Image (spheres, helix red, strand yellow):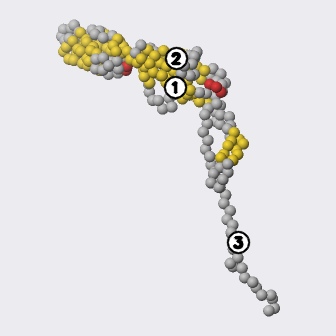
């Protein structure tokens, strides 16, 4: 199999070419890891084109050939597509992690990128990089992580992670949220009371450090009175015996 390309840039056009020396001519096929990308019958040369390659085109490609006398040994090459980091998979709640106090928690982010990128984790955008980070690579799918040990109240916050390789970079925000159920608020009071409004205040309960939201329910009690007193149905009765 001729290696016309090895490492290419994203959006390039790529041609894979397979040469077979056989008599009679062979049926030839070029495949990636999941499907056929080109085939020919009674041929000695097969070309397969991939236009506008992307990250996910990275991987092994195999040429196989067979004629009526037998099958040739398969030949493979690895196509490497250089691409800048970008998010991988669904982002719905994908950047939120939960933990209790005093435990350990690992924050992670998965991207598509090649070459393998670096992950820099910080508590603030310009803060000092955090220790205890790691990177796991599976083809162009790369996961960076950082572990926070003995979680404290001040660890419940936003974290930034910058992912960088030779082709570009991205920056994402990851949130660590308390896994605690909030305690009941205390010391509820009302002030600035008028006919139409009042201002409630309270002391929030412990929530492990995460931001809380509150729902107000107001119950009113009505009492009906006559005003002025109703005397319309009152009658004088004469004394007995008259």
Dots 3, 1 in contact, CB < 8 A: no
Q: Position of residue 8 (x, y in %)?
A: 33, 13
Screen quadrant of the N terminus: top left
**Residue 19 horizontal side relative to residue 173, left or right:** left
Residue at the location (65% across, 46% down)? 199
Between residue 42 and residue 209, name the one nearer to us.
Answer: 209
Q: Position of residue 202 (x, y in %)?
A: 68, 41
In terms of secondary structure, where does tag 1 sit?
Answer: strand
**Residue 153 horizontal side relative to residue 90, left or right:** right
Screen quadrant of the C terminus: bottom right
Residue at the location (30% across, 11% down)? 5
What's the CA distance linking mark 3 and mark 2?
79 Å
What's the CA distance linking mark 2 and mark 1?
12 Å
Q: Earlier in the sequence, mark 2 or mark 1?
A: 2
Residue position marked by numbered label 1 in the rendering: 173
Q: Earlier in the sequence, mark 3 or mark 1?
A: 1
Marker disc for residue 153: none
Between residue 15 and residue 242, name the one nearer to us.
Answer: 242
Residue position marked by numbered label 2 in the rendering: 120
**Mark count:** 3
* Residue sitting at the far bottom: 242
Query: Where on the picture, by quarter, is residue 2?
Result: top left
Q: Earlier in the sequence, mark 3 or mark 2?
A: 2
**Residue 92 horizontal side relative to residue 190, left or right:** left
Residue position marked by numbered label 3 in the rendering: 229
Between residue 196 and residue 119, name the one nearer to us.
Answer: 196
Mark 3 surroundings: few (<14), some (14-19) or many (≥20) residues within 10 A: few
Residue at the location (35% across, 20% down)? 54
**Residue 22 horizontal side relative to residue 175, left or right:** left
Q: Is residue 233 above or below residue 73?
A: below
Q: Position of residue 200 (x, y in %)?
A: 66, 45
């Amino acid at each position: 199999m001729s290696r016309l390309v090895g490492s290419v840039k994203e959006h390039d056009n790529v041609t894979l070419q397979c040469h077979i020396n056989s008599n009679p001519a062979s049926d030839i096929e070029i495949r990636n890891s999941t499907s056929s990308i080109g085939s020919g019958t009674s041929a000695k040369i097969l070309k397969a084109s991939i236009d506008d390659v992307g990250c996910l085109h990275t991987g092994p490609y195999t040429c196989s050939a067979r004629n009526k006398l037998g099958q040739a040994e398969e030949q493979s090459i690895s196509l490497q597509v250089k691409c800048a980091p970008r998010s991988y998979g669904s982002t719905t709640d994908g950047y939120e992690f939960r933990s209790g106090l005093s435990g350990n928690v690992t924050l992670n982010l998965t991207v598509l990128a090649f070459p393998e990128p670096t992950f820099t984790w910080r508590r603030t955008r310009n803060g000092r990089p955090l220790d205890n980070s790691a990177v796991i690579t599976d083809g162009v799918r790369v996961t960076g992580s950082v572990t926070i040990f003995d979680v404290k109240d001040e660890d419940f916050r936003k974290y930034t992670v910058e992912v960088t390789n030779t082709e570009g970079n991205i920056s994402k925000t990851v949130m660590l949220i308390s896994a605690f159920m909030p305690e009941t608020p205390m010391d509820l009071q009302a002030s600035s009371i008028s006919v139409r409004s009042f201002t409630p205040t309270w002391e929030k309960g412990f929530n492990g450090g995460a931001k809380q939201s509150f729902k107000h329910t107001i119950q009113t009690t009505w009492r009906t009175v006559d005003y002025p007193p109703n005397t319309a149905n009152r009658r004088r009765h004469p004394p007995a015996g008259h």
